Image (cartoon, rainbow, N blue to C red):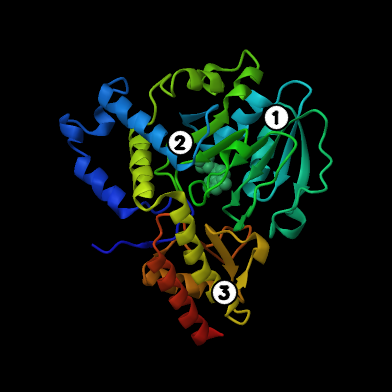
Amino acid sequence: MKRAYNFNAGPSALPLPVLERAQKELLNFQNTGMSVMELSHRSKEYEAVHNAAKERLKRLLNVPDGYDILFLQGGASLQFSMVPMNLLTEGKIGCYVLTGAWSEKALKEAQKIGLTTVVASSKEANYTYIPPLDDVQWPKNAAYVHITSNNTIFGTQWKEFPNTPVDLVADMSSDILSRPFDVSQFALIYAGAQKNLGPSGVTVVILRNDLLERIPDGLPTMLDYRTHQKSNSLYNTPPTFAIYMLSLVLEWVEEQGGVAAMEERNQQKAAVLYEAIDESGGFYKPHAEKGSRSLMNVTFTLPNEELTKTFLAEAKERGFVGLGGHRSVGGCRASIYNAVPLEACEALASFMNEFRRRFA
Ligand code: PLP
């Protein structure tokens, strides 16, 4: 069987050894005579899977004491609402940094809940860069500042996280686990799993426990972080199979040498593609400014629509999947999350070079 060169933005490639292991265990998990997805979520076998996933994530990200990890549903999109519902209390202001479509969506949901302000934005440049926060005048009653660590659609990424005087909240859906970072810089982090963590269905939230004291009473039970923190994310039936897959992916990351090793590989992979762009004499134009380039989503355009169509059609014939850019950027996007091997990036770069030689 030939696996596709999968450059999908999400859901995206999973590590082959993880899929093989899940296949092997599918019908009879640890001699239970059942699949993981058939186990009761109250069974000791499932609980071990659940707690192992949590422990592995804690280890891999060096999550300090005083933080908790939650496994929720509803995707990162539900967090756009849950963050302000839980943290944007009366009279406080939710500060937002706009760096792309996902941060705009996060802001839009917060506006329905409480007061908000945009403290920095690169919208005027169609989100080609990450705006600096040095000159921000922070409101005195700021509840938090929300950033999107990696902008999946535009292909930009925060290189260093800002030191802010207010609690920092980050949507890390498209780059969590791709590089080491200091969790203690953040009040809350959330990420839909379907890029670097596993299949869709589970959303990871890492939060500093003192935030729980600020949560207003009266929220719907399922939308209150305290419900999930108190019950070890087992208040209701969790997405058990997705959490099992998350655990296998985390085990794989550990075997690869952890998050630092992931970063090294991700840098190599991105360098191969950015080199093909930079050395194309302007045939491939990068969307992101150099200092803001993402290691996860490489965005570029070709000289015209016609060539873009031909490029995508030929790429598809050669087994490259998911290279079409989002309509707000146009052109192409190669999403090269943790599970995409260097070899796939090398193959794509070599196709890009060959295509350019024929059409430039
Ligand atoms: N935030 C970012 C940065 C994303 O890339 C995505 C999806 O691609 C989302 C949020 C939305 O995630 P979900 O589909 O889990 O709601």
Q: Which residue is mark 3?
A: 277
Please report the residue visible at 81 percent of the width from the left and 37 percent of the height from the top: 138
Residue 205: % across, % down = 52, 33
Q: Residue at x 21, y 40 (%)?
A: 25
Q: Tell me where residue 350 sits by quadrant.
A: bottom left
Does mark 3 have its CB less than 8 Å from ligand 1? no
The circle drawn on residue 40 is none
Instruction: Say above or below: 230 vs 276.
Output: above
Number of other residues with Cα within 10 Å of mark 1, as a class: few under 14, some 14 to 19, many 20 or more: few
Marked residue nearer the N-terminal end (3 or 2):
2
Quadrant for the N terminus in the image? bottom left
Instruction: Mark 2 or mark 1: name the one nearer the start of the chain.
Output: 2
Residue 58 numbered tag: 2
User: Is the residue at mark 1 in contact range of ligand 1, meaning its CB lies under 8 Å from it?
Assistant: no
Q: Amino acid at mark 1?
A: Lys
- Tell which circle, 3 or 1, labels the residue nearer the N-terminal end: 1
Q: Disc 2 marks which amino acid? A: Lys
Where residue 2 appears, x then y in whole percent? 27, 64
The answer for how far apart the CA atoms under marks 2 and 1 are is 33 Å
Helix, strand or loop at label 2? It is helix
For disc 1, the marked residue is: 112
Residue type at numbered disc 3: Ile
Secondary structure at numbered mark 3: helix
